[in-house]
Image (cartoon, helix red, strand yellow):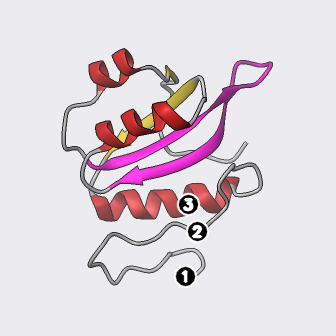
Amino acid sequence: MPNLYLGPDCLRFEQVVIDRVLGPRSSGNYALGVKNEAGEFVPLMIGRSDTDLRSELTAKLATDKYPYFKFNVTSPQAAYEMECAQYHNFKRQLAKNSHPVPPEGSDMNCFLCGQ
């Protein structure tokens, strides 16, 4: 399986867990998904927040019914690059299959395809 770049922790996608592991106003990446028969995390949605990852995940709880998530706290620029890598690695299985958009006010392009 391609690399997700989010580390080994696979957490239950629940408000109490989000509140426990994330502080307010952190930028970073997330992946929502399921576990396969071997117990491995399978990402079905990826995303990022450039300003508040905790709020972004909380908003996803109401609309996206995935049982597990992974995350990484990092800068908006690094989060964009990571999201691009995740998109290119997993785009065939993602529920939303559109290329990530650079951070607002940035002139960054995808390091993999130039988009």
Q: Which numbered disc flags the more N-terminal residue, 3 or 1?
A: 3
Q: Which residues are magenta?
A: 27-49
Residue 34 is left or right of residue 5, and the answer is right
In the displayed structure, 15 sits above or below 70; it is above
Q: What residue did someone put label 3 on?
A: 85
Which residue is found at the position 62% from the left and 66% from the top? 98
Residue 44 is left or right of residue 22, and the answer is right
Q: Which numbered disc flags the more N-terminal residue, 2 or 3?
A: 3
Magenta stretch, overall SS: strand
* Quarter of the image where the N terminus is located: top right
Residue 10 is left or right of residue 75, and the answer is right
Q: CA distance from mark 3 to mark 1?
A: 12 Å
SS state under label 2: loop
Asked which quadrant contains residue 33, the reply is top right
SS state under label 1: loop
Mark 1 and mark 2 residues within 8 Å of each other at the beta carbon: yes
In the displayed structure, 90 sits above or below 81; it is above
- Mark number displayed over residue 56: none
The location of residue 30, given as percent across then percent down, is 46, 42
Which residue is found at the position 41% from the left and 63% from the top? 80
Q: What residue did someone put label 2 on?
A: 99
- Which residue extends farthest top? 16
Residue type (three-letter) at the residue carrying disc 2: His
Label 3: few (<14), some or many (≥20) within 10 Å?
many
* Quarter of the image where the C terminus is located: bottom right
The location of residue 42, given as percent across then percent down, is 68, 34
Q: CA distance from mark 1 to mark 2?
A: 8 Å
SS state under label 3: helix
Mark 3 and mark 1 residues within 8 Å of each other at the beta carbon: no
Total count of labels: 3
